[in-house]
Image (cartoon, grey):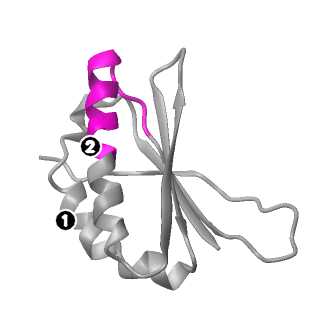
């Protein structure tokens, strides 16, 4: 299994709602690809933090979806968030009870 996650910091409740409304479009784009399992979204209730986590059968499946992700990402206005987006990816090895991943700042495209 392979996971990729992103940490977003929307600028307020309205921006958070905009992000949450956009994420099903991302899940729909991913669902057209082999190996996509599910998009899980963690929403921190008392803060403006959203963490979408995409579950894939393999890293290769995830990488194959990147062009569709990039096309959809380029339609979104990331100016509605504070600070940089942070992202991480990790392969989950069978039989392992622990996996660590690094979450690093990334720069979304500007409009």
Instruction: Look at the image and tell me whether residue 9 can be seen.
Output: yes
Q: What residue do we see at 34% from left, 51% from top?
A: 107
Which residue is disc 2 drawn over? 22
Badge number at residue 71? 1
Q: Is residue 9 magenta?
A: yes
Residue 88 in which image quadrant:
bottom right
Above or below — where is 95 with respect to 81? Answer: below
Residue 54 horizontal/vertical position (percent): 50, 59
> Magenta segment, principal secondary structure?
helix
Q: What residue do we see at 36% from left, 77% from top?
A: 33
* Highlighted magenta segment, given as a residue range: 8-23
Instruction: Look at the image and tell me whether residue 12 can be seen.
Output: no
Residue 89 in which image quadrant:
bottom right
Is label 2 in a helix, a strand or a loop? Answer: helix
Residue 28 horizontal/vertical position (percent): 30, 60
Is label 1 in a helix, a strand or a loop? Answer: helix
Residue 47 horizontal/vertical position (percent): 51, 18
Above or below — where is 81 with respect to 25? Answer: above
Labels 2 & 1 near each other (Cβ < 8 A)? no
User: First in sequence: mark 2 or mark 1?
Assistant: 2
């Amino acid at each position: 299994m392979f996971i990729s996650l992103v940490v977003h910091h929307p600028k307020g409740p309205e921006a958070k709602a905009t992000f949450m409304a956009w994420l099903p479009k991302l899940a729909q784009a991913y669902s057209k690809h082999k190996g996509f399992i599910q998009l899980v979204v963690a929403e921190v209730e008392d803060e403006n933090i959203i963490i979408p986590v995409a579950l894939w059968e393999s890293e290769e499946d995830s990488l194959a979806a990147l062009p569709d992700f990039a096309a959809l990402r380029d339609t979104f206005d990331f100016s509605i968030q504070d600070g940089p987006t942070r992202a991480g990816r990790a392969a989950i090895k069978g039989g392992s009870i622990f996996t660590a991943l690094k979450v690093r700042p990334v720069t979304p495209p500007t409009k």
